Amino acid sequence: METYLIGIDVGTGSARAGVFDPQGQLLASARHDIDLFRDERRARVEQSSAQIWEAVCQAVRAAVAKSGIDPAAVAGIGVDATCSLVVQGASAGVGDAGHPERDVIVWMDHRALEQAQRINRMGHAVLSYVGGVISPEMETPKLLWLKENLPEVYASAAHFFDLTDFLTWKATGSLQRSSCTVTCKWTYLAHEAGWDASYFRQIGLGDLAEAGFARIGAEVVWPGTPLEGGLSQTAAQAMGLRPGIAVAAGLIDAHAGGVGTVAARGGQGDAAACMAYVFGTSSCTMTSHADPVLVPGVWGPYYNAMAPGMWLNEGGQSAAGAAIDHLLRLHPATPQAREEAARAQMELPQWLAQQALAAVVHPSEAVWLAGQLTVVPEFLGNRSPLADPQARAALLGLGMEHDIDSLVALYVAGLCSLGYGLRQIIEAQADCGVRVQSISVSGGAGVHPLTRQLLADATGMPVEITASPEPVLLGSAMLAAVAAGLHADLQSAMPAMSSVAGCSLPAQGDIAALHAARYQAFLKSQQLARALRDSLAPLLAAHTQGHH
C-alpha cells in the first residue's frame, strides 16, 4: 500500500495541513483560520490554544479529503508552528479576565519588554547564545511577566509550552519537547543537553529550576524523533486518522521552511552555503555553520536546531509582510487600488507587483520606480542585527503624489528596504565569519517573481526558489518521514524530498550601483530614526510621568 505523510504548519493567522508522498510531492493542502486578539495600547497579542487545535484537526481532515487518499495510508505527522507561549491548565487566561480561553501569548506580543531589558542588564552567560540580547518575543521574559503580573495564572499552570510542543502534546500526550523550540526561544543549551539553572535563578524563575524544569521540558529530543505513544486515540479521531502512527518532534515554523529548502537538490548541495529566508508576516533568516559563531544582535548559535549536527544563527525582522501591509495602508490611493485588485481577484501586494512588472522590461528595472523614496520598515523594532525592539520606522523622500503610480513606487521601495535589512544581517554575519553563497526564499510573501528579483538585487546574492509550492509544510512532512522510518534521518530526507526550481541572479551595472546607493541611504535613515528616538525619549518620558 502507498504511504503518505502530513505536514502541519500553524502560522499567525491560520493552521494549514498538506498531504505529501515520500518523495516530497504535495497532493493536497487545506487551511483553517485562527482568531488573533490584539490590544495595541498594551502591546498584547493573544490566541486560544483550543481554537488552534481545532483548526489543525479541521485542516488535516480537509487536506486528506481533498487528496483522495485512504486516511489509513498516512504513516506519520510532522508539525511546525509560531514560537508563541501556551499556558496550559491555568486558573485563567493570559490577559483579559473575561476571556479565560485566551491562553496563548503570541510571538509578536511585546508585553515583556521591561522584563527583557532587566534580564539583559543582568548579563548572564546564557545570553551569548541569543546574540547577546534576549528579545521580548522569547519565552523567559514572557514567563517572568506572567509571574510578576498574573501570579495566580503562573502558579496554577500545569505546563508552559512553545506552540509546536503544545500541538505534539495534544497529538500524543507526550511531554517531550523539541530541541528546536526550547533552544531557540527558551535558553535550553542543546550543545550541553541541559538547562542552565543559574540563569533561571538569577532572573527570578528559580522555581522552574527547583522543580527540575518539569513545567517547561524535563525531556528534550531532536526534531524528527518519533514521540512516545504516537498519535493518540483521541487525536486520531479528531483528525480522521489511524491511532498510533508516528508523530515527530517538531520545529518552529521558520525553521521548517529552512529544512524544506536549504539542502534541496540542484542547489549549493551544502546546508551551510545557503541561507534560508522565510518571508511571511515576519521574516526569519537561518544560516547553518559547522562551528558555533557568536554574531552580536543575531540569535544563536543554536546547536542542532535546524540542519542536523550544525549550529544555527537566526535573524530576521518582527514585521516583513506585515510591514508592507502597514506601509500600504498609509497611502491615500490604497482604497482605490484595493478595489482594482479585488476586480482582478488578487491580493493588493500581488496586484501592485503586477503593476510594477507591467511598467518595466525586466523585473530588476522596477527599482527605478521607487525614485527617492527610502523606507526603514521597523514598525515593530529591529530584531537583528541591531536587537532593538524599540526601533521605529522611517519614510523619507515623499512628494505630494497621491495616485496609484506613487503607491506602486512606495510598494517597490518597501520591498527593497526589506532586502536592505536582509543585506545588513548577511554583512553582520560575514563580519563574524559566517558567509553564504545563496539565499533560498520561502513563505507566502516571497513567492512572486518581482519579490525574488528585488531581494537578489538588494542583497547582491542569488535567490533560489524550490519546486514545492509549500516548502514550510514540506519541512514538517520531512520530519514525519524520518519519524515514520521512510527516510533514515533529516540529512537524507532534505535533498530527497526537495529540489531547486529556479534562481534569480542579482543585477549588475547601473542597477547594482543604484542598490548600493539606496542601501547606504537606508543605513543613514536607520541611524537618523534611532538618533531622533534617543533624543526625544527622555522628554517624552518626563512628559508622560508628569501627566501621571
Image (tube, rainbow, N blue to C red):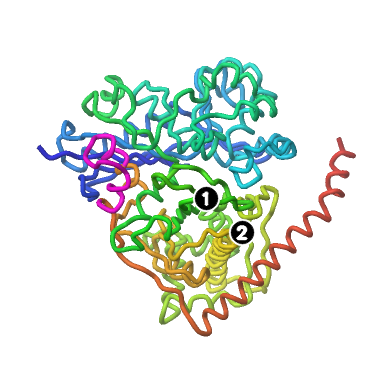
- Residue situated in front as seen by the camera: 515 or 246: 246
Quick check: 470 left or right of 288? left
State which quadrant residue 525 falls in: bottom right
The numbered mark at residue 377 is: 2
Give amino acid for label 2.
Pro
Q: Residue at x 51, y 32 (%)?
A: 47
Q: Position of residue 430 (x, y in %)?
A: 56, 62
Q: Position of residue 108 (x, y in %)?
A: 57, 42
Distance of mark 1 from mark 2, alpha carbons? 22 Å
State which quadrant residue 245 falls in: top left
Q: Residue at x 56, y 23 (%)?
A: 93
User: What segment carries the magenta color?
Assistant: 479-496
Give amino acid for label 1.
Asn
- In the rendered image, the residue lying farthest to the left is 1
> Which residue in the protein does label 1 denote?
313
Quarter containing the N terminus: top left
Q: Residues within 10 Å of mark 1 (few under 14, many from 20)?
A: many
